[in-house]
Image (cartoon, rainbow, N blue to C red):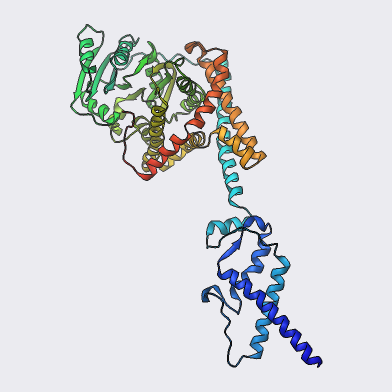
């Protein structure tokens, strides 16, 4: 009787452990796992849960668990399986936490394995990466601010010599236009006529297949006596890109041309802008191009005009000034830019790219040239007047940023890596604006580290805005109100243009059809 009772209890215990093991095996065969948040000690759980795959009662490779009764069971094998099930069930019950309500598919994934190994989840990893990217851009801003402070001290101790040239080079000005309003184009021509440049100048007007009365107005303006030499070039059909119109004028350049200057048909240059830009270009024989300070006109017309005005005169100008001292300006604004004619003949024109000014600049940098910046060369340009027009423009610019990076990488990846920090700085401000970072750090992640880095990033950007406005306050007639508003408007426009920048990058990644989008 004693042996019989002991045997019955043993059989009942074996049956209980068998049912537990069967339930666990079915759970495994259903390919489910627990949500990572429910098991903070993953290493213990994984260590004890892994033997479930090798249970003698079934495995994932054999499909769903089926109990197969042998006609002649082996007593030793039965006892061995019972002991294995009992050990696994004890271990599982001893370390497991209560089963959560949420399940996620269990699929072999290296990323998930890495997260489990590092005891991280996707939310923590994204917070870590975001903090690192913003911290890197914050270091760049801090370095720019230190450089500007050191440069100001050096200028006080040792005033740099004047950049006046003994002989001013021959300048060829290209003005492409397509269905431009008569008033804006004639204002551009009048500003060129009044420019105070001591060297020889020729102006080539390129009509890119206009269908309005602008060409007739230009012909009437040219019929009057002028102080500079003008040439009119008419194209029968519109090429769809500004770079193609510029390339059409290259064969018509004078053999004596030393500098090719591109001025948009809606841009007015200051009287001394051309001279200042040429002096900056010839400050070093390594300079392939130079650009001036582009200021959006009509800032008092609407809030959209003010957004673009403060964006151009803010931290963007200060960062470009630092880049010019390092010879690494990565964007030559197409509204007013200068290029050495010899370098254009060496590297080629602009026709193969959608955003010709950015791509040509990166190509020159990849070939070992440098780019200059002349903050005293001021040009006033007409910016988009509607939100949709601004959206299309920035979408095209964002695509041009990635396009230029790919062009430069194909030429020289080593020189392109030197420009990578500036590209990442733009990417952070364009895709992860500071205003969005502050909300994410406070509401989504609740991370003090991310909040601190985002706040420091905004403070440094505000300091650069302050320095830039102080530097241009006399030339642009800026006051205390502008010092206070520049950081606010820059924060708003960064968040406002996030969708345009993101879609522009996706356009280039997908390789869609290139379109000017603003014509």
Determine whether, in the image, residue 434 is placed left or right of residue 349. right
Determine whether, in the image, residue 398 is placed left or right of residue 211. right
- Quarter occupied by the C terminus: top left
Q: Residue furthest left?
A: 236
Q: In this view, does 447 lie above or below 516?
A: below
Determine whether, in the image, residue 28 is placed left or right of residue 519. right
Q: Is residue 190 above or below residue 17?
A: above
Residue 344 appears anywhere in the view: yes
Q: In this figure, what is the number of numbered marks?
A: 0
Q: Which residue lies furthest to the top in this view?
A: 225
Q: Position of residue 26 (x, y in %)?
A: 59, 72
Residue visible at 53% across and 62% down in the picture:
107
Q: Position of residue 494 (x, y in %)?
A: 50, 30
Q: Where is residue 418 in the image (x, y as percent from the top left)?
A: 47, 37
- Quarter occupied by the N terminus: bottom right
Q: Is residue 269 above or below residue 455?
A: above
Quarter of the image for residue 146 reads top right
Nearest the viewer among 232 and 179 is 179
Nearest the viewer among 247 and 286 is 247
Residue visible at 60% across and 48% down in the picture:
123
């Amino acid at each position: 009787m004693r042996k019989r009772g002991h045997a019955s209890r043993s059989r009942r215990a074996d049956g209980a452990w068998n049912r537990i093991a069967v339930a666990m095996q079915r759970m495994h065969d259903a390919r489910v796992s627990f949500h990572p948040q429910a098991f903070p000690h993953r290493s213990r759980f994984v260590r004890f849960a892994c033997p479930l795959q090798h249970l003698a009662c079934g495995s994932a490779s054999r499909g769903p668990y089926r109990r197969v009764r042998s006609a002649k069971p082996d007593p030793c094998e039965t006892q061995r399986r019972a002991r294995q099930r009992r050990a696994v069930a004890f271990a599982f019950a001893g370390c497991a936490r209560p089963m959560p309500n949420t399940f996620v598919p269990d699929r072999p994934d290296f990323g998930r394995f890495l997260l489990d190994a590092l005891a991280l989840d996707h939310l923590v990893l994204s917070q870590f990466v975001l903090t690192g990217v913003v911290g890197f851009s914050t270091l760049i801003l801090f370095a720019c601010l230190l450089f500007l402070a050191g440069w100001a001290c050096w200028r006080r101790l040792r005033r740099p010599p004047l950049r006046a040239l003994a002989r001013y080079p021959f300048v060829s000005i290209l003005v492409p236009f397509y269905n431009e309003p008569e008033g804006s184009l004639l204002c551009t021509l009048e500003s060129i006529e009044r420019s105070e440049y001591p060297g020889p100048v020729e102006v080539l007007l390129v009509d890119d297949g206009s269908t309005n009365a602008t060409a007739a107005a230009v012909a009437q303006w040219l019929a009057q006596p002028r102080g500079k030499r003008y040439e009119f070039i008419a194209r029968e059909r519109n090429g769809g890109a500004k770079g193609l119109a510029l390339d059409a004028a290259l064969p018509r350049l004078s053999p004596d041309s030393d500098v090719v200057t591109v001025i948009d048909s809606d841009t007015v240059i200051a009287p001394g802008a051309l001279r200042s830009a040429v002096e900056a270009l010839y400050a070093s024989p390594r300079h392939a191009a130079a650009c001036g300070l582009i200021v959006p006109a009509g800032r008092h017309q609407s809030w959209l005009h003010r957004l673009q005005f403060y964006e151009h005169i803010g931290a963007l100008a200060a960062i470009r000034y630092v880049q010019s001292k390092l010879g690494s300006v990565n964007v030559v604004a197409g509204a007013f830019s200068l290029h050495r004619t010899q370098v254009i003949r060496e590297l080629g024109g602009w026709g193969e790219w959608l955003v010709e000014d950015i791509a040509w600049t990166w190509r020159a940098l990849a070939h070992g040239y440098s780019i200059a910046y002349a903050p005293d060369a001021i040009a006033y340009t007409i910016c988009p007047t509607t939100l949709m027009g601004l959206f299309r423009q920035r979408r095209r610019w964002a695509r041009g940023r990635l396009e230029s990076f790919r062009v430069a990488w194909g030429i020289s990846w080593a020189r392109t890596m030197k420009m990578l920090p500036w590209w990442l700085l733009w990417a952070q401000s364009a895709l992860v604006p500071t205003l969005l970072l502050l909300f994410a750090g406070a509401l989504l992640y609740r991370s003090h580290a991310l909040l601190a880095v985002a706040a420091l990033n905004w403070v440094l950007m505000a300091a650069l805005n302050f320095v830039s406005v102080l530097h241009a306050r006399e030339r642009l007639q800026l006051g205390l109100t502008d010092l206070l508003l520049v950081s606010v408007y820059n924060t708003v426009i960064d968040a406002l243009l996030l969708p345009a920048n993101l879609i522009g990058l996706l356009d280039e990644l997908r390789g869609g059809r290139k379109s000017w989008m603003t014509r």
